[in-house]
Image (spheres, rainbow, N blue to C red):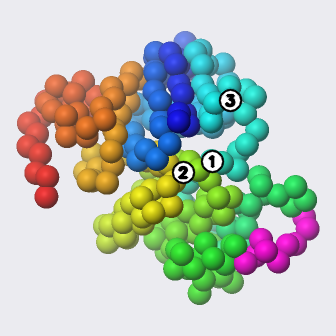
Amino acid sequence: MSIVDIHELSYSIDNITILENISLQVQKGDYLAVVGPNGGGKSTLVNTILGLNRGYKGSIKLFGDPLKEFKRWEKIGFVPQRVIEIDSKFPITVHETVKLGRISSLRQFWRSHKEENVFIDEVMEMLKIPHLKDRLIGELSGGQKQRVMIARALVSKPELLILDEPNTGVDQETQREFYSFLKRLNREKGITIVFITHDIGVIEDSINSIVTVNRELIKSNNPTTIFNCKVMRDVYGIDSHLQNHRH
């Protein structure tokens, strides 16, 4: 089943082409990495998929529905860039931040439901952050904020989780724990994952598909085949010699 279906997508701003002739399908159960240089159009692609960019050419379908008709946003969880850059004085607790993720799936979101709070607590337990429940979000470390934002994305019970460079500013040990957690979400919970990054060093064995974006798109269902000198030169604009150690 195709969860995201993009056909001949192009997008321009002030006559500057950001994305050109992008065609891509994301299947149910995929773990897809989108890599490319800063300014190459990765975030623009994500924002367009999420309906935040208007005026694009081509077609986008989500869960079989044209983007302009899509209403089931609770099926999609989103973790944005720079999750650690939250104002330290912003007066919202961890529990309140996570609960915001339920808004899209609540018919009467101002009414408190015991079962909703129980589920929120379960998600926070899964991410090992229940002890942070009453802390202000701005007081947390980068890794803790990352977990909170993932919890916020997961409480709507999404079938698709999109993460736009969520590791910016997060230390390497936290990153390793994070990738392990994403692998479990994909393999044990069956959540389809689209992971956007400019760092090819994060690509690991659990990812089953990869695309590179630098205005245009190159796709491979086998990540090892896309890491070659020609592709890296075309995508990043640098001459390089790559040696792939699969260990």
Q: Which residue does the numbered mark 3 point to in the structure image?
A: 65
Q: Position of residue 155 (x, y in %)?
A: 66, 63
Nearest to the observer: residue 176 or residue 90: 176
Q: Are marks 2 and 3 in contact (CB under 8 Å)?
A: no
Which amino acid does the dot numbered 3 rest on? Asp
Residue 44 seen in the current view: no
The quarter of the rendered structure image containing the C terminus is: bottom left
Q: Which residue does the numbered mark 1 point to in the structure image?
A: 76
Nearest to the observer: residue 19 or residue 70: 70
Q: Judge whether 42 appears above or below 157 on screen.
A: above
Which amino acid does the dot numbered 2 rest on? Leu
Q: Are marks 1 and 2 in contact (CB under 8 Å)?
A: yes
Task: Give the magenta range.
Answer: 110-118
> Along the polypeptide, which appears first: circle 2 or circle 3?
3
Residue 38 seen in the current view: yes
SS class of the residue under badge 2?
strand
Q: Position of residue 61 (x, y in %)?
A: 62, 28
The residue at the point 63 percent across, 76 percent down is 122
The residue at the point 35 percent across, 34 percent down is 211
Which amino acid does the dot numbered 1 rest on? Ile
SS class of the residue under badge 3?
strand
> Along the polypeptide, which appears first: circle 1 or circle 2?
1
